[in-house]
Image (spheres, grey):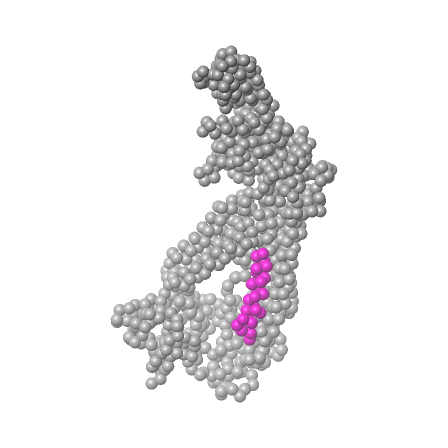
């Protein structure tokens, strides 16, 4: 421990500037987070949004990476001329000293900033100690460990930046490759395994370098891991994985919902293109049979389009996100088609076979909640308040993470918000609006306070001018619930004789201009 | 019989500060070391000399476990070289001409930083070395001259009374004054340590080495006490009564045999006055005069290097 402390103190003397910059950026980040809770910040867009949200995090990460790189390369593990390799350094103690430095100059300031943010947001930090510590784990594993591993196989910060550039290019290549592989963007495939390979390799290289200083071999190991991940992306049988994850629902035991093609109301007469390789096809569907207390989410869609002229197009699995609630009558399923295929078959009657990957949730723990005045505590959510800058909604701040699953339902006819000159007549009783927050990811989170809006919307007014919602105000009754996973499955639909031109999507959006009329 | 051999080996290991067996290092297809067998006795001042690319630095880096050997083994202070790390370096002081020091540190800071690593660090000796080398404690290493940096490195490697001091080309590029200071500093420690030094500077080596090894093309051509080596090499000049009539086969120990009129010159590498004289008379018959001149270490190795090239 004496040696750990001794090396650590030397590093502090040498790298205090890098540490100080990182701490200052951490303070700036915390200050900016508090500033962002201001209602007006939610309506900042474009470059200003980047300046207020993205830039502080990017600068903070860069400062962390600089701290890690400098302190690791302080006793460089690359080369055979460093004075320290023939001195009585014990590798475990050297590594421990470096870890201590990173913990004290990266993780501790982050922890302090997170405690400050919690307190400032009205939470008791003492109640979240475990969560606060747990927040550091993804930061360490996903943001700091790979950089530390890279620093052990590079001699200078410049070398490391070049390596980071190569990694950025590799990741762009991976993303491009994934987008070209059918079904890859929907199926999680081997993502967890890929993550484990990369994290495990980084950890192994870090330990190996400190123990043995085998730089060339370590570099090969890192490169090998990148190739393994690439290989996994290419050879993963995505369709089989989706088929296994979403087995076909057994119709004899009852389907979670029924879907039928809804006739189009206005055929397309003319379309003009903007540039783009993909064409959006929107299939309107009538929905029925969603059981009370259940919610169906369409996670993915796969379609096979066949035309009598010959061309057959298989889209592979594409991500979706449509959520269907009990009582909902209509929805639309969107497909992306390659332009050149579309152009060949758009006027022909085609057969479309749709496969929908569904997740059924049980809407449980429903509780009524009437929105109080001012700032209030919403059970299991955090501290919330009504905001009325542009629309009437609830803005909440929760500790550590957003609720994993929170459904807010309201009958918009029961709104207590005053009418404005722009409002249509109030919706009929029983017109339900929903907002479902579901966050299951466990990626790195910088701030201990998550702010988000609850703004229920009516779900089935695609293409229609449905009832307008005045929003949520003090006294508006809500139903809060926490939908829980029930089952996954797949249903198949088949539609014959469709002319794709009639289902061309994108009215009023950037993309094609589609004119509908008789 | 085999037991006796083992006992002998053990006994040798016990008294050897450095011992290598068939030590081989390959970089790709290049043999940097080709079966080096070396034995450095405890208390010796052993100079490993040889031309550029002979494998001196590679040998030292293997001894210090900076590289691993391709084949063979090395023992340093009784430890396998591949196990030398951490605490083992409390007994070893290593200084190299191209070592990267923490240049941001001041001289005093470097010494203060290294002090706690060594249980045997001697503050009085540290002060003595600082004074002896005239080290500016408040100057940053990056602002020091090459000679001063070497002196700082050497001071930091001597202050803890290492059992073994390993120096890789410590005198390269230094002015004579600094060389003298370094040698003086080393000699003051010679009684308590084994010193293993690689160098091109044969004149300097000659002044203080007790043993010398000559490495060429990764092979140890010779390894012996310096006094014995100097004693067995002589420049011999033979004056004949008449020019030699026909080329005769000279003994293997004669290097660079040349004849000019009635004078034959050569380097005798196994000098013994009576034997050499007898061999001369056997070859040339009666001679008018024979002179034997002692050789400097530099002359000896030049003769050996040239002989090696001629043999190739």
Q: Which is nearer the eye, B9 or B305?
A: B305
In this orientation, which residue lies closer to the viewer: B256 or A275? B256
Outermost residue to the left: A309
Q: Can you say which quadrant of the picture contains the C terminus of chain B?
A: top left
Left or right: A20 in relation to A183:
right
Q: Is residue B48 magenta?
A: no
Q: Is residue B142 shown above or below A189?
A: above
Asked whether residue B3 appears in the rendered view, the answer is no
On screen, residue A421 versus residue B205, left or right, reads left
Residue B140 horizontal/vertical position (percent): 67, 47
Magenta highlight: main SS: helix
Going 59% across and 45% down the picture, which residue do you hit?
A: A92
Residue A106 percent across, percent down from the top left: 61, 57
Q: Quadrant of residue A188?
A: bottom left
The magenta-colored residue range is A43-66
In percent of the image, x 65 and y 52: which residue is there? A14
Total numbered circles:
0
Q: Position of residue A225 (x, y in %)?
A: 46, 52
B166 or A38: nearer the viewer: B166
Q: Position of residue A151 (x, y in %)?
A: 55, 52
Q: Is residue B268 left or right of residue A373?
A: left
Residue ID at (45%, 50%): A224
From what the image shows, is residue B58 above or below residue A166?
Answer: above
Q: In this orientation, does residue B171 appear?
A: yes
- In this picture, residue B159 sits left or right of residue B299: right
In the displayed structure, would residue B13 be above or below residue A92?
A: above
Location of residue B186 (image quadrant): top right
Q: Is residue B195 above or below residue A482?
A: above
Q: Residue at x 42, y 82 (%)?
A: A464
């Amino acid at each position: 421990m004496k040696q750990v402390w001794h090396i650590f103190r030397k590093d502090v003397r040498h790298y205090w500037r890098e540490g100080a910059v990182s701490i200052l950026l951490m303070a700036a980040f915390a200050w900016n987070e508090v500033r962002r809770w201001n209602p007006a910040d939610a309506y900042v867009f474009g470059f200003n949004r980047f300046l207020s949200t993205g830039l502080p995090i990017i600068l903070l990460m860069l400062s962390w990476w600089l701290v890690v790189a400098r302190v690791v390369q302080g006793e460089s593990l690359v080369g055979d001329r460093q004075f320290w390799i023939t001195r009585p350094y014990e590798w475990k103690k050297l590594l421990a000293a470096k870890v201590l430095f990173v913990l004290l100059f990266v993780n501790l300031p982050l922890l302090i900033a997170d405690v400050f943010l919690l307190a400032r947001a009205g939470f008791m930090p003492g109640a979240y100690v475990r969560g606060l510590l747990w927040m550091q784990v993804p930061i360490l594993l996903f943001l700091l460990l790979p950089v530390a591993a890279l620093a052990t196989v590079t001699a200078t910060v410049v070398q490391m930046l070049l390596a980071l550039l190569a990694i950025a290019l590799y990741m762009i290549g991976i993303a491009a490759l994934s987008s070209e592989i059918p079904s890859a963007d929907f199926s999680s495939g081997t993502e967890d395994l890929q993550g484990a390979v990369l994290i495990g390799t980084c950890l192994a290289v870090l330990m190996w370098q400190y123990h043995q200083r085998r730089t060339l071999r370590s570099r090969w190991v890192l490169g090998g891991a990148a190739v393994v991940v690439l290989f996994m992306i290419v050879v993963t049988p995505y369709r089989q994985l989706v088929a296994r994850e979403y087995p076909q629902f057994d119709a004899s035991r009852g389907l979670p919902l029924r879907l039928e093609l809804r006739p189009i109301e206005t055929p397309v007469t003319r379309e003009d293109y903007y540039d783009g390789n993909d064409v959006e096809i929107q299939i309107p569907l009538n929905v029925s049979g969603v059981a009370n207390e259940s919610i169906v989410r369409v996670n993915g869609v796969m379609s096979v389009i066949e035309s009598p002229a010959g061309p057959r197009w298989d889209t592979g699995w594409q991500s979706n996100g449509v959520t269907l609630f009990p009582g909902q009558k209509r929805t639309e399923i969107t497909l992306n088609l390659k332009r050149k295929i579309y152009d060949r078959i758009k006027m022909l009657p085609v057969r479309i076979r749709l496969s929908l990957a569904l997740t059924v949730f049980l809407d449980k723990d429903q509780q009524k909640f009437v929105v109080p005045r001012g700032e209030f505590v919403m059970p299991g959510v955090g501290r919330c308040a009504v905001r009325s800058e542009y629309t009437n909604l609830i803005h909440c701040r929760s500790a550590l993470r957003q609720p994993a699953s929170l459904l807010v339902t309201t009958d918009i006819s029961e709104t207590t918000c005053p009418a404005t000159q722009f409002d249509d007549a109030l919706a009929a009783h029983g017109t339900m609006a929903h907002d479902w927050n579901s966050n299951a990811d466990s990626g790195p989170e910088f701030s201990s306070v998550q702010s988000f809006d609850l703004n229920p919307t009516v779900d089935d007014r695609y293409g229609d001018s449905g009832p307008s919602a005045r929003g949520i105000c003090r006294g508006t009754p809500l139903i809060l619930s926490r939908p829980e996973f029930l089952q996954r499955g797949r249903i198949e639909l088949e539609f014959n004789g469709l002319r794709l031109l009639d289902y061309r999507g994108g009215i009023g959006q950037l993309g094609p201009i589609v004119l509908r009329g008789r | 019989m085999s037991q006796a051999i083992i006992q002998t080996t053990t006994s040798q290991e016990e008294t050897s500060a450095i011992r290598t067996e068939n030590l081989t290092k390959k970089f790709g297809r290049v043999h940097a070391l080709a079966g080096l067998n070396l034995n450095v006795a405890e208390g010796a001042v052993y100079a490993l000399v040889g031309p550029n690319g002979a494998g001196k630095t590679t040998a030292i880096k293997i001894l210090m476990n900076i590289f691993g050997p391709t084949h063979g083994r090395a023992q340093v202070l009784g430890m396998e070289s591949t196990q030398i790390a951490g605490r083992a370096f409390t007994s070893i002081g290593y200084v190299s001409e191209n070592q990267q020091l923490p240049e941001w540190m001041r001289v005093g800071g470097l010494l203060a930083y290294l002090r706690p690593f060594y249980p045997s660090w001697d503050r009085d000796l540290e002060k003595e070395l600082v004074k002896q080398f005239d080290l500016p404690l408040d100057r940053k290493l990056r602002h020091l001259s090459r000679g001063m940096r070497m002196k700082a490195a050497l001071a930091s490697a001597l202050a803890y009374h290492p059992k073994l001091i390993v120096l890789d080309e410590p005198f390269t590029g230094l002015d004579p004054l600094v060389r003298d200071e370094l040698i003086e500093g080393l000699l003051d420690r010679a009684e308590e340590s084994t010193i293993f030094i690689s160098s091109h500077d044969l004149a300097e080596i000659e002044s203080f080495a007790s043993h010398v090894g000559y490495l060429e093309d990764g092979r140890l051509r010779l390894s012996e006490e310096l006094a014995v080596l100097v004693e067995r090499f002589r420049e011999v000049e033979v004056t004949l009564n008449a020019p030699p009539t026909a080329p005769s086969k000279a003994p293997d120990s004669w290097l660079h045999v040349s004849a000019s009129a009635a004078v034959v010159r050569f380097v005798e590498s196994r000098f013994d006055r009576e034997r050499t004289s007898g061999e001369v008379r056997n070859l040339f018959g009666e001679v008018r005069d024979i002179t034997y001149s002692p050789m400097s270490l530099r002359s000896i190795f030049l003769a050996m290097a040239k002989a090696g090239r001629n043999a190739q």
